[in-house]
Image (spheres, helix red, strand yellow):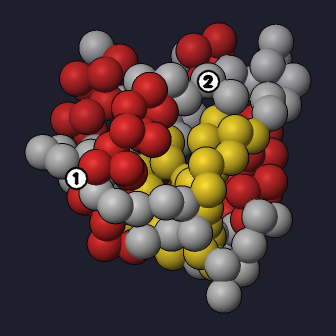
Amino acid sequence: MTTIMAFGSFDILHPGHIYFLKKAKALGDNLVVVLAKDSTILEVKKREPKYDEHQRVEHIRDLKIADKVRLGYEADKYEVIEEINPDVIALGYDQDGFADKLEEEMTKRKMHPKIVRIDSYKEEHYKSSKLR
């Protein structure tokens, strides 16, 4: 069984998110989606999410694409990767903040998941910052 992890805020769900999750799921057998906590969104995006973390978890579960949906951690954002120990980490085309140090962190933690960048889906229309 190949486990894939995907990360995101998934605050305002749109077709680009669904595309990303389906592409990530196609990379293996078991998709684990980790959502950013409200406090992490505030820290990174400098704004409150429209939907709270529990609502966002339910929204992703309702899509029935992921095999498991959970929240990440505030203190150590890479801890969840150690817990799940995925074979593949799927990143969105625009996930830079988290991704910048991902390979370095994985090496430090003696982990070697394959890191795959998923292309965008109609970015000119379906980007959360444009839909806000």
Which element carries disc 1, helix, strand or loop? loop
Q: Is 30 positioned to the left or the right of 25 in the image?
A: left
- Quadrant where the image shows the C terminus: top right
Residue at position x 51%, y 69% in the image: 86
Which residue lies under the disc numbered 2? 94
List the single residue furthest toward the left.
Answer: 75
The picture places residue 8, in percent across and down from the top left corner, at 49, 42
Q: Earlier in the sequence, mark 2 or mark 1?
A: 1
The residue indicated by pointer 1 is: 73
Q: Say which mark, if any, is on residue 115.
A: none
Element marked by disc 2: loop
Question: What residue do we see at 61% from left, 24% from top?
Answer: 94
Q: Residue 90 at what x, y percent from top left?
A: 63, 50
Camera sees residue 58: no
Residue 41 lies left or right of residue 33; in this view the side is left
The residue shown at (25%, 34%) is 40
Could you tell me which residue is drawn at 50 percent across and 23 percent down?
Answer: 96
Q: Residues within 10 Å of mark 1 (few under 14, many from 20)?
A: some
In the depicted view, which residue is nearer to us: 115 or 35?
Answer: 115
30, 100: nearer the viewer: 100
- Horizontal relation, residue 20 to residue 30: left or right: right
